[in-house]
Amino acid sequence: MRIIAAYMLAVLGGNENPSPADIKSILDSVSISADDDRVEKLCSELNGKNLDELIAEGKEKMSAVPMGGGARAAGGAAAGGAADEAAAEPEKEESEEEESDADMGFSLFD
C-alpha cells in the first residue's frame, strides 16, 4: 500500500510515469524501506497508463461487488411490520428494568 501511495504522490506531483528510483526516493524521504521487486513490478504494470482512468475503472468494478449489507436489510423489510412491533416492545420493558436496577434506591450526587 505504501508503494502505491508513493506512486500516486509522484503522479500528483507531475511525474506521469514514475520510475522505481522515483518511488524509492519518496519512500526513503520518510524512512520507509520497500522491496525493490515490488516497486519494479508496480512501475512496470502501471507504465504508460493514466492513473485517473485506472481509479475510475476500479470504482466501476467495486460498484458491482455486493457488499452484503443490502441483502439483510431487504430480507428484514420483507418480514413485515408486525414482527418488528413485537420485537420492539420487549426491548422497552428490558430497558425500564435496567433503569430501575441501576438506580438501586440512591443517587451518586446526594
Image (cartoon, grey):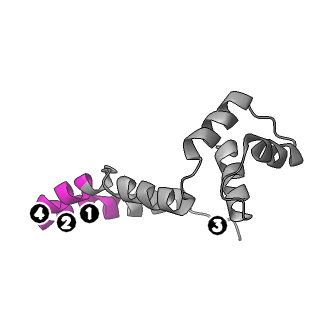
Percent of width and height locating residue 34:
76, 34
**How far is the residue under mark 3 from the one under mark 1?**
29 Å
Question: Earlier along the polypeptide chain: callout 4 or callout 1?
Answer: 4
Mark identifier at residue 85: 2
Image quarter (top left, top right, bottom left or bottom right) of the N terminus: top right
**Considering the image in quadrants, where does the C terminus appear?**
bottom right
Q: Residue at x 34, y 51 (%)?
A: 67
Magenta region includes residue 3: no
Circle 3 residue: 107
Q: Can you give x and y, in whole percent of width and height, for residue 42 in the image?
A: 61, 40
In the structure shown, which secondary structural element does the residue marked by tag 1 occupy? helix
The residue positioned 69% from the left and 37% from the top of the image is 39
Which-is-in-front pick, marks 4 and 1? 4
Q: Nearer the viewer, mark 4 or mark 3?
A: 4
Secondary element under disc 4, as helix, strand or loop, is: loop
Which stretch did the figure color magenta?
Answer: 71-93
| CA gap, disc 4 and disc 1 | 13 Å
Q: Nearer the viewer, residue 44 or 78?
A: 44
Specify the amino acid type for callout 2: Glu
Q: Earlier in the sequence, mark 4 or mark 3?
A: 4
Front residue of 42/16: it is 16
Q: Which residue is mark 4?
A: 80
- Could you say which is closer to the camera, residue 82 or residue 31? 31
Q: Which residue is mark 1?
A: 88
Left or right, 28 with reference to 57: right
Distance from the alpha carbon under mark 2 to that under mark 1: 5 Å
When the figure is inspected, residue 28 is found, relative to residue 59, above or below; the finding is above
